[in-house]
Amino acid sequence: MSRTPQEIFESYVYAGAMTRNADALAANFTADGVFEAPLMPAGAAFPRRLVGREEIRSAMTAYYEQQAKGDRVPNLEKSGYVLHTTSDPDVFIAEIDTVFDGDGDGEDVTVSLVQIFRIRDGKIACLRDYFGPELMA
């Protein structure tokens, strides 16, 4: 049974941004899936390009372990996204505004990004994640 773009996107976001579960995140990809963050500089903590489910799993496990335990989680009530289908049924685009609550007197922080998904057999064959690299410092 094939999953819809909505189901694929929600599963990916829950596994990654919400629960930081590298096993579940990697399970969303095909065995040869590619995860790219093309705007990340070489040597950054957040991986720039990962190829294959196993590399995605191991690199994201390491990345999540580096994150501070007090790292903020997105506020789902304030955050939003729009999915755009394309003329290619195996490609969809996610336009995302993720909002993190401000600390005490601080203002909320909004992170805007675009993700391009290429799907094969209900799994992510290629994901390009476009966001400002300074957001992952």
Image (spheres, grey):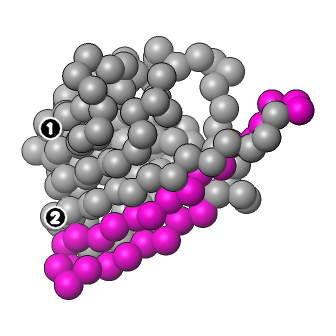
Mark 2 sits on what residue? 120
Farthest residue in the left direction? 32
Mark 1 sits on what residue? 52
Q: Is residue 51 above or below residue 9?
A: above
Label 2 Cα neighbours within 10 Å, binned few <14 / some 14-19 / many ≥20: some
Amino acid at pointer 2? Arg
Quadrant of the rendered structure where residue 35 is?
A: top left
Label placed on residue 32: none
Residue at image x 48%, y 22%?
A: 137
Horizontal and vertical percent position of residue 66:
47, 15
Label 1 Cα neighbours within 10 Å, binned few <14 / some 14-19 / many ≥20: some
The magenta span reads 80-105
**Marks 2 and 1, how far apart in space?**
14 Å
**Residue 93 covered by magenta stretch:** yes
Left or right, 80 with respect to 34, comes to right
Q: State the predominant SS element of the stretch in magenta.
A: strand
Image quarter of the N terminus: bottom left
Horizontal and vertical percent position of residue 116:
29, 60
Secondary structure category for the residue under label 1: loop
Horizontal and vertical percent position of residue 104:
88, 30
Residue at image x 32%, y 79%?
A: 85
Farthest residue in the bottom direction? 87
Secondary structure category for the residue under label 2: strand
Q: Nearer the viewer, residue 117 or 132?
A: 132
